[in-house]
Image (tube, helix red, strand yellow):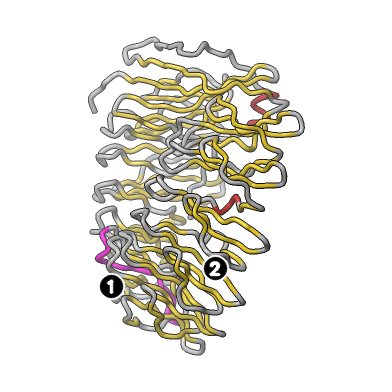
Amino acid sequence: MPYRVAPIPVCLIALITGCTTRAPSAGSSQRPRGRRASTLELTQLARVDAVTWVAESLVVSPNGGSIAYRDHVGRNTRVVHNGRPHPIYTAIGPLRFSPDSRHLAYVGRRKNRDHLVLDGRPGAGREAISSGSITFSPDCKHLAFSAKTNLQHQVVRDARADQPFDSIGLGSITWGPRSQRLAYAAKLNAKAFVVMDSKPGPAYDDVAHLAFAPRGKRWAHQAREGRQYRMVIDGQAGSRYDSTSPPFFSPDGRHLAFVALKRGHGLRLIRDGRAEPLYQDIGRPLWSPVGNHLAYVARSAAGYRVVQNGRATSPVAQITAASLTWAPRGKHLAWVATVQGGEAMVQDGRTGPTWQEIFAPVWSPDGRRLAYGVQYRTPAGVASRLVVDGHPGPFFAEVGKPVFSPNGRRLAYPARRGTSWHMVVDGRLQAPLRRVGHPVFDPQSRHVAYVAVTAEGFRVVADGRPGRAFAIILGRKPGMVSFDSAHQLHYLGITATGREATIYRVTQRLQSQNK
């Protein structure tokens, strides 16, 4: 069951038209009063006009430090990246940052030709380019996409086009983990292929669920022949089934598992070619982080079980499949089971106390601690609390997802009492606020920061101290900040006055403190 926390709202249209905040000068700094001082440095990234910019096109880079958006220029449009305008086009597709945030790609159209635009530089004009096919390699040194020419489709890798096909599988372009191999699904003359490094493989009626092993030496996909399905591993087709799940490689890439259906018999897990017992239903297989263990939830006539390395637990009335979770080092396994009287957290086969409802568990990074939320329904309303290491905490109306510090010693989570939200850090309530986002710890576990909504606007609260107010705050994820080091974080802050808004990269340096 998910944690019941309303997200911080982000509405950029309302930001421009309904909010007014004082715009600080670029490069200005702020030093809050008090013992634990911090310094803000603001760098202006862009100044936008509510009439000409396309607010819904705004994207934030994965590291939370860059932005890009579309801006109207008469009847045409252009991309603005960190305040720098790109060439003008008649139409522009969705914007996409590379995983390392260093590159920006999109499709721009002019004179009835599509161009793949990389870092503002347009490539060769093509009849059509699928915006959704743009895929960066893991090392971000290569890029591939699907283009259309004369009713046929080609995958283009670093400006080199593969042979044409009738179609390219939507979302199938897949890079190997080491960025050296590229594969995708294609169809030609009613037959389907997996094309690996520009070479089509065996023909099938259909192919799907293409996946590389994490270390890149192995690959697999599902293939259909008539009404039957096979798992193709490293180019070799396996047994026939009535249906299969996608392939699931272990994190070390040495093992592969999938779920297979035989009508009239049931479902069974196939692990490294060996079949496990039949069940009526099987959940998604879950490998341990190091790849030496495999667990899944299975249902039979007797009830639900967790099957770990082929060994099944005693049946219970219900198991929440989404709650099944390994500790980061793979030494412990936990899940939520429905038992007589309610729900219980089961850890390594040991059943804990019974509660009315339990939220999904969260492990500390070292795998030694476990936290989860519980909920009560009473005539007076709903009450929630967090259970940490088996010890229940104080009651709240709602609790949010807990976050452990990198060293596993500290814990923070949002909680609501009445209409006010608090951040609970190491068991202590911080000041009440209208809304709070997800807490983020620095790499050394000394500081904790989060985005909050106050009467004056959005603020970042670091170590319990609210910072400067902005009309909106953006990060690598909605409502999150990013630490650059043990004592420095950054986020994007936006001020608005009338129809004009200014976007800043905000760098905040925190004073060292011992924890």
Image quarter of residue 402: top left
Quadrant of image for the C terminus: top left
439 in the magenta segment: no
| Residue 25 seen by the camera | yes
Label for residue 337?
Answer: none
Quick one: which residue is furthest to the bottom in this view?
264
Comparing 388 with 164, the one in front is: 164
Q: Nearer the viewer, mark 2 or mark 1?
A: 2
- Percent x, y for residue 429? 40, 30
Mark 1, residue position: 309
Disc 1 marks a residue whose amino acid type is: Asn
Q: Earlier in the sequence, mark 2 or mark 1?
A: 2
The answer to whether residue 382 is left or right of residue 405 is right
Q: Residue shown at 47%/71% (left/top)?
A: 200
Kindly state the secondary structure of the residue where label 1 is placed.
loop
Comparing 309 with 430, the one in front is: 309
- Would you say the magenta stretch is mainly helix, strand or loop? strand
- Percent x, y for residue 300? 43, 80
The answer to whether residue 153 is left or right of residue 315 is right
Please provide the residue range marked out in magenta.
290-305
Comparing 76 with 460, the one in front is: 76
Label for residue 186?
Answer: 2
- Percent x, y for residue 471? 58, 23
Q: Residue shown at 63%/31% (left/top)?
A: 12
In this rendering, is residue 414 above or below 302?
above
Q: Residue shown at 33%/64% (left/top)?
A: 287
Kindly state the secondary structure of the residue where label 2 is placed.
strand
